[in-house]
Structures are given as C-alpha cells and as structure tokens.
Image (tube, rainbow, N blue to C red):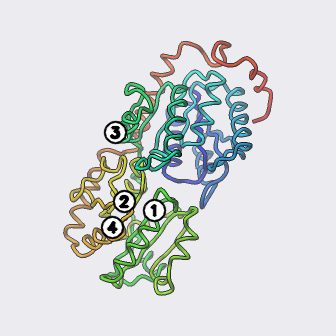
Amino acid sequence: MKVLHVITESNLGGAQRNTLLSLQGIVRHGGEAHLACGPHGPGDETALIREAEKAGATVWKVKSLVRRPAPIRDLAALLALMRIMARHEYDIVHTHSFKAGLLGRLAAGLLGAPVVVHTFHGVPFDTRSDNWKTRLCFFLERLQCRLCDKLVSVGEVLRRELIANNVAKPEKIVTVRSGVDFSLFDDIAGDRAVREELGVPAGAPIVGFVGRLAEQKAPEVLLHAFIIVKRRAPGAHLVFIGEGPGRDHLIKATTPDLQHCVHLLGERHDVPRLLAAMDVFALPSRWEGVGRALTEAMYAKLPVVCTGVNGVPELVEDGVTGLISRPDDPADLAEKILALINDPARAAAIAQAGHEKVKALMASEAMVLALHELYRELVSASSLPPGHPARGVSCVRNLRQAKP
C-alpha cells in the first residue's frame, strides 16, 4: 500500500505529530509512506521532515505550500502536488489541515486518485462566530469533502459538530482518535532540573501552556489570567512552550514586574520533561479539536484548566478530569487555576482521573491500527486502479515527467 500524506507546515505541532504517527504506522505495517509538506512552520520548522525521514518515509518539500492565503503560491503548490501525485500513483492520498486539505484534495480529485482521505484535527476557525470567514470556510469544506472517500475526525464530539454544520453526511465521517506515544512520558523526572534552569524556587507553583502562540489558543488570555493569579499566589510562575505570531504580543504585554516569572521557552523537544515540572496546565483555546497538548498534559498527571470548546469535553469533564473555564474570560480562568493551586488534594485527584481517561482513549497504536483498517477497506472498495484513464483528467498525464 502506497500512501501520500499532505500537510501544510513541517514543525511538530499536534496535527504534525498525528501525521508522523500515521507515517510510522504505514512503514511498520509494510507499506510505502510519502509525505508532502511546506518546509515552514513556527519554531523548529523542519522537525516533521527529519522525523518522517528517520521513520523511513519519502518526503517531498513543497516550498510554495504556506499557511496564509497567497493565490500565486497556492496555485504553484497545487501544481507541485499534482506533479507528485501524477508521478507516483498513490493508492491513498491523505490530507491534513485547512490549506493542505483544500489543495491536496483538489489535486487528488483532478488526477482521480483511487482513494482520498482527509483528517479534521479540529475546525480552522472559531465556530462561535457566524461571520463571512466562518461561512466561507464551511462552504469550502463542503465542496472539498465531495472529493473525499472518507473523512476522519480526531474525536466523536468534533464528528458530531461537523455533521451538525452539514460538512458531510454522517456515514462519510469516522472517528479515529488522535493517538499519542505515551512511552515518551513514562518515568520522566525533570522537576528540580527544570526549576533550576528557569530560576523557579522549590515549592513555587508553575502554570504551564503548550501550543501554538496564535489566536486559536488564546495565550494572551492566559497571561492576563496569570496577572490575577499573581495577586493571590505571589510566588507563581508561568511557562509558555511554543511559537507563533502571538509571541511578540506576549513579550510586549509582559510588564517589567512579570519578566522574572513569565517564561517564553519557544518550541522545545523536551516537553515531557518540562511537563513533569509543572503544577497546573492551562489551555484557554477559542476552538480546538481535542487538543494534543491537553492530552499529553493529562497523561503526565497534570491537573488541567481549559475551555470546553469543540471536542475538549470528550476528555475533560468539569470537576472530574479537569476544570472548564469560560472562553475569553481571564478572571474565570484565574479562579480555576487558583482553585487547583490552593487545593493540592483536589488537584491530585483530578490529575489521576485525567490520566486514566486519556490512557484508555488515546493510545497511539490504537490509532495506527484503526487507520490501517480504514485504508485496507477503502482500497479494497476502490473499483479503478491508480492511473486508470477514467480516474483523472487526461490533460495532466504529462505531469509524470515533470519534477515535483
């Protein structure tokens, strides 16, 4: 089985880690894995490329594939993806993220790929808003989903939301929960070393965040909440792990009196070690699929405070496996963080319950096996082989001779 995964950015965010696990699974099960991605992304922008190649996947770098709308570059990326697909005749094209999903599915549709799959890691916009951007995104998704044989949702709540918004018919969307390699988080000891590295005294509470510093994750809301937390817990520290366009705003908003206790660590490859040093994990997202960083924090036995948006309630039951705060409400977020800091016994109980929840739902091998079975079923059901004239548009056949 020959599978091409297409994703926009090549850092190691949540969607990229999901894609990497899928690529590793294909190779492990004897298939041929390819990856097409833009060689860009916040932080370590080629981490996915390195890890995919290490896993035995073939990587195609599409320089014109970028996150933001850019008509000329988008057209160039579409043609580059078509060249890759036309030359290699994949059994399956599997796309991820909004931009790569649009261009990858269009390229696969024009070429008549035997099987096309798209994964929704979340929705790429705030579904609480009914503005023109939200309506346009849903319209484009409805069109593009017609080019897919199957849509994958990383959570059941997200699947129901997609159905409710008429993205596709229920029978076309399946839930395959985004797996996490939990072995990376076992037996991690980093508390004392991390505190020394950051200059945090023993016993001082650390509130942590992992994610893209962007509008979706609302890191500025957490910073404003932390200012409130500091008034009642003067020794507290706040750690941001991740990169993104919101970094400059956070730097400007960190007043001189906060600079010693607000730590912007950028993208890190030792997240499990850093999580082991935290006392509370906070994720005030405005929209979210399920939340890979949230899953990892819960497995690491951290009590979590998060907004109950989109697929998050699938993991976080308020007061049981975490605390739910209102979106865009720093005061409410601060109260929930303080509730955990001030009640260690309750925090420990919530952390243990969260650990058990994600351990049961989000194991990486379960995801890999579910995808492998889905691929097998779709390929078996495909009536025409790769490259069959009836599958593609004849005017693009000469693309096979062009370089990707």
Per the image, the residue denoted by label 4 is 333
Residue situated in front as seen by the camera: 289 or 275: 289
Image quadrant assignment for residue 184: bottom left
Image quadrant assignment for residue 161: top left
Per the image, the residue denoted by label 3 is 156
**10 Å neighbourhood of mark 1: few (<14), some, or many (≥20)?**
many
Per the image, the residue denoted by label 1 is 218
Residue at 35% over, 78% down: 228
Q: Earlier in the sequence, mark 4 or mark 2?
A: 2
Residue situated in front as seen by the camera: 326 or 363: 326
Q: Distance between the Cα atoms at labels 3 and 4?
A: 26 Å
Q: Earlier in the sequence, mark 2 or mark 1?
A: 1
> In the image, what residue type sits under mark 4?
Leu
Q: Distance between the Cα atoms at labels 4 and 2?
A: 8 Å
Q: Earlier in the sequence, mark 3 or mark 1?
A: 3
Residue at 43% over, 62% down: 272
Which numbered mark, 3 or 4, is in the foreground of this view? 4
> In the image, what residue type sits under mark 1?
Ala
| Kind of element beneath mark 1 | loop
Q: Distance between the Cα atoms at labels 2 and 3?
A: 21 Å
Residue at 73% over, 31% down: 83
> In the image, what residue type sits under mark 3?
Glu
Disc number for residue 327: 2
Q: Is residue 116 left or right of residue 283?
A: right
- Which image quarter holds the N terminus? top right
Q: Distance between the Cα atoms at labels 1 and 4?
A: 12 Å
**10 Å neighbourhood of mark 2: few (<14), some, or many (≥20)?**
some
Q: Position of residue 6 (x, y in %)?
A: 60, 39
Q: Distance between the Cα atoms at labels 3 and 1?
A: 24 Å
